[in-house]
Image: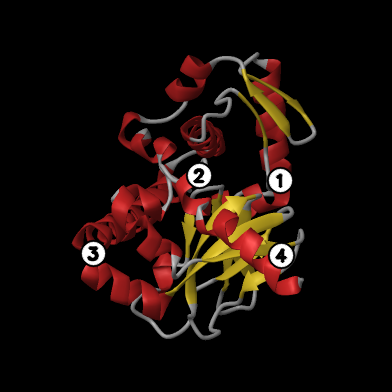
Amino acid sequence: MAREIKLKLAPALKASCHTCSLSNLCLPLAVEENQLDRLEDIVEQGHIYNRGEHIFDQDTPFRSCLAVRSGAVKTSIITENGSEQVTGFFLPGELIGLDSLGGERYACTAKALERTSVCKFPTEKLEELTRAMPELQHHMYQLMSREIQGSHQLAMLLSKNSAEERIAALLLSLSSRFQRRRMSGTKFSLPMARSDIANFLGLAVETVSRVFTRFQNQGIIRTQGREVELLDMETLRGAIPESNRQSSRARP
């Protein structure tokens, strides 16, 4: 009986990449329909993490790249003085662990910000597959390049911009990323706490709260808890220097 149930479930699992609503954002984007089964063969699906659980830890053996299927993930590193530095936030369809490719250990820690489901791509099998599928290898290079560019843009954002500019850039980045998921780009819930936003942007929590209040008083946004509505996109875009507007469309 158990074997019979397993056989019934197998086709549904096998077809998951074909039917996943995030396939246009994830690795299947780079794979032809007739080759998708080869990618599915290496995917480990259905890994669930509750809010606050670690998905992997900095300096532990690098096993897999991961794609967020639902929920949200925060990455961070432990600095030399032992404090946490938030390095990024990941939404459904985005890949985690690209900064560890080429190394033997994870370069950061990944933690679930809410109940989160991920798909794992074991690195050994993924490397074999990219060698056999040049289009997938090219896509991986593009993703790695985007990761490096994002790091450069973040460094520029934090070194020169005011608190208002940093927060505006984060809100616009989240807006564009929610839109790519066919969700509202003007009304969404922040998956991260303001303390994480402050850490990520190099600001005090009180400063983040003051800027949110100022934006709300100016009619630029409306907030209630973690719920945010962007009321004046043009003013929000105008708050960012021209040289940094590209970073507002990238993944922080």
Name the quadrant containing residue 27: bottom left
- Dot placed on the residue nearer the N-terminal end, 2 or 3: 2
Badge 1: how crowded within 10 Å, few (<14), some, or many (20+)?
some
Give the amino acid type for the residue marked by disc 1 in the picture: Arg
Residue topped by disc 4: 5
Give the Cα separation between the discs numbered 1 and 2.
Answer: 35 Å
Q: Which residue is mark 3?
A: 133
Amino acid type at circle 4 is: Ile
Would residue 2 be seen by someone viewing this image from the given angle? yes
Q: Residue at x 47, y 57 (%)?
A: 95
Mark 1 lies on a secondary structure that is helix
Q: Residue at x 51, y 18 (%)?
A: 233
Residue picked out by circle 1: 194
* Image spot of residue 170 (x, y percent): 53, 39
Q: CA distance from mark 2 to mark 3?
A: 21 Å
Is label 4 in a helix, a strand or a loop?
helix
Query: Looking at the image, do the residues carrying marks 1 and 2 touch, with CB atoms under 8 Å apart?
Result: no
Q: What is the CA distance from the residue labelled 1 to the residue labelled 3?
A: 42 Å
Q: Residue at x 37, y 72 (%)?
A: 126
Residue 12 coordinates in the image, percent (x, y): 58, 54
Label located before the other in sequence (1 or 3): 3
Which residue lies at the image location 50% right of the left edge and 44% below the top edge? 19
Q: Position of residue 149 (x, y in %)?
A: 32, 53
195 relative to 234 in the view: left or right: right
Residue placed most toward the observer, 67 or 40: 40
Measured from the top left, where is residue 72 in percent x and y? 63, 51
Comparing marks 1 and 2, which lies closer to the viewer? 2
Asked whether the residues under the numbered discs 1 and 3 touch, taking CB atoms below 8 Å apart as contact, a structural biologist would say no
Q: Nearer the viewer, residue 246 or 56?
A: 56
Residue underneath mark 2: 19
Q: Nearer the viewer, mark 2 or mark 4?
A: 4
Give the residue type that dot 3 points to: Met
